[in-house]
Image (tube, rainbow, N blue to C red):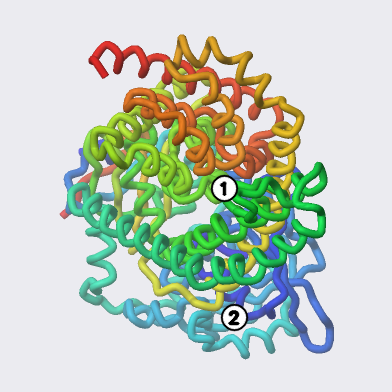
Amino acid sequence: MGNPNVGKSAVFSRLTGAHVIASNYPGTTVTFTEGRMKVGERACRVIDVPGTYMLEPTSRAEEVAVEMLKDDDIVVNVVDSTNLERNLNLTLQLLNRDVRMVVALNMWDEALEHGISIDVERLAERLGVPVVSTCAISGEGMRELRDTLAHARRAPAPLGDEDRWAAIGKIVDEVQQMEHRHPTIGEELSHATVHPVFGPIFALLVLAASFEVVRLVGEGLIAYVAEPIFEGLWQPAMQRLSAALGSGGFIHDLLVGELADGQVSFGESFGVLTTGFYIPFAAVLPYVFSFYIVLGILEDSGYLPRLGVLADNVMHRLGLHGLAIVPMLLGLGCNVPGALALRVLETRKERFIAATLLAICVPCMAQTAMVAGLLGQYGALGFLPVFGTLFLLWLVLGSVLKRVIGGTTPEILLDIPPYRLPYWNALLKKLWMRMKGFLKEAIPYVLLGVLIVNLLHTFGVIAVLSRLFAPVMSRVLGLPPEAVGALVVGFLRKDVAVGMLAPLGLSLKQLVVASVVLTAYFPCAATFVMLYRELGARDMAKCAAIMLVVAFGVGGLLNLVMTGLGF
Amino acid sequence: MAMPLDLLPAGKSAVVVGLQGGRGVMRKLDAMGLRPGRRVRMLSSQFMAGPITVLVNGRQVAMGRGIARRILVRAVD
């Protein structure tokens, strides 16, 4: 246990082996990670609990941390050596709880850099429990920590609750010595990156670089790993299956899909085993993977809180916390991790607004590719109306939701950690857990979605829907009734919907309207499911209603405006 | 002469003399080191009433203006 940003994850990572799982605390969206290690002869569970400042919790994550504390546990209290005074607050409260404890004075190397020296033995004496200085990133002190765990002790806190800060002050005076040092480069950078002018410039650079890395790694994975596997191995296998099933018929079309020119096409066939596998593994997974790498670096280096501060101004006007910028940015790559990132937000109101804005206004890579495919020929004249409308909608819808939804959005109050080099082992473990999560959660639903669309198509439901919605399509949106098919398919996979719109020979205006509606009305099936799990049934229903109303409303409005402007 | 924290000019240091606010916010501020008697230094504030960033006990803390407004400080040199 320990304050946020003290390196608990790194310590956890050092203590545990490869077998780590992330779990949800029941009834919440707060996650904790669990692994195993040996203390002496006994195998033990190690739990990395959300960071908390004190045992009288102020947030759900802190509540979980407190509830997880059980009497016969050994607590490894990870303390930030560069911030002894603040961290001891939790330490003394833990001592009061009468549990066996070992204190790990982590970030020892940083403390030395800052000219801070702490008398470890004296501190252990005063606290009554073993204290070990550690640097989880380099591994120093970790063996000592492991050995000391067997000697964890209970001890009464040095003084009662009322005098806690005074007691802390005395202890700190006794054990800590600070040399005055000039600000390090890290510190200067730290201050600069929150500066109102320099900060946003730096942020844009970081974001641009991040997107580039994600794009390059993603594309690389697709080109060198996914495509070869699918074209080289899976395609022939599916081709054989297709022949074995007679190249047609119900089962065949369900599993393999419709052949294009006698060939299995992953983009068009729409079989559960073909398109259903291709989409999550070859088209989405590489980007999700590369996103998580970049996200892990941004998180562990300490940059994200600064980004939250810079964005807070705008976010707050939309009823959101500054950190909500994270799911929004993630959503630009793939809405699924964006939806997962909604967990950083505390209140139900914020999560609802962020989810709605994410689903409606933040186009994922697939959607962006779709727009590029449809409107590329028109260049800026095509892109500006589409993305401009989405951005405006983001601002307007956010402001409206902020006012309309009950509840307040708490103001930002964040500890901003110093910049640190991420610890690669912890990064990899996080990546591994997140990928496992994605595979488990997103993929089954994509498969299900393909199956459903397939069935709908086979039973002619799509044709019926086309006729039903024809009046809406033509009068409100100015689109031909066939576009409904694209909308239905778009629920599953937006970029594939392009294939359905392209041959319709639409005008610029129609393409713009179709693009906006397609992007806004529903996210892809995987995101839809994720949001459902984050928001719950009732909120998701409200969200879905808003999606539909807004998408068609804005589409109709856009149609009017563009017609009026003479397009 | 006491003033709210959000009016402290960038670069200036001050000592906290009082805090107002709801219990949750107060506890969190307390835990982060913003207590009467503590020194803080104003680092930066975002445009258009955005969050401010201060240095407390060697550590950066960012907070919204509304919270900052309810922390009373006295400027020191």
Q: Quadrant of residue A77?
A: bottom right
Q: Amino acid at mark 2?
A: Val
Q: Residues within 10 Å of mark 2 (few under 14, many from 20)?
A: many
Q: Nearer the viewer, residue A272 or A74?
A: A272
Q: Can you tell which mark lies on residue A336?
A: 1
Q: Are marks 1 and 2 on the same chain?
A: yes
Specify whether A558 is left or right of A362. left
Q: Nearer the viewer, residue A360 or A28?
A: A360
Specify whether A188 is left or right of A91. left
- Is residue B43 at least partly visible in the picture? no
From this view, report whether residue A384 is shown above or below residue A7: above
Q: Residues within 10 Å of mark 1 (few under 14, many from 20)?
A: many
From the image, which quarter does the N terminus of chain A lie in? bottom right
From this view, report whether residue A212 is shown above or below residue A487: below
Q: Can you tell which mark lies on residue A131?
A: 2
Specify the subunit that label 2 lies on.
A
Q: Secondary structure at mark 2?
A: strand
From the image, which quarter does the C terminus of chain A lie in? top left
From this view, report whether residue A548 is shown above or below residue A118: above
Specify the subunit that label 1 lies on.
A
Q: Nearer the viewer, residue A192 or A399?
A: A399
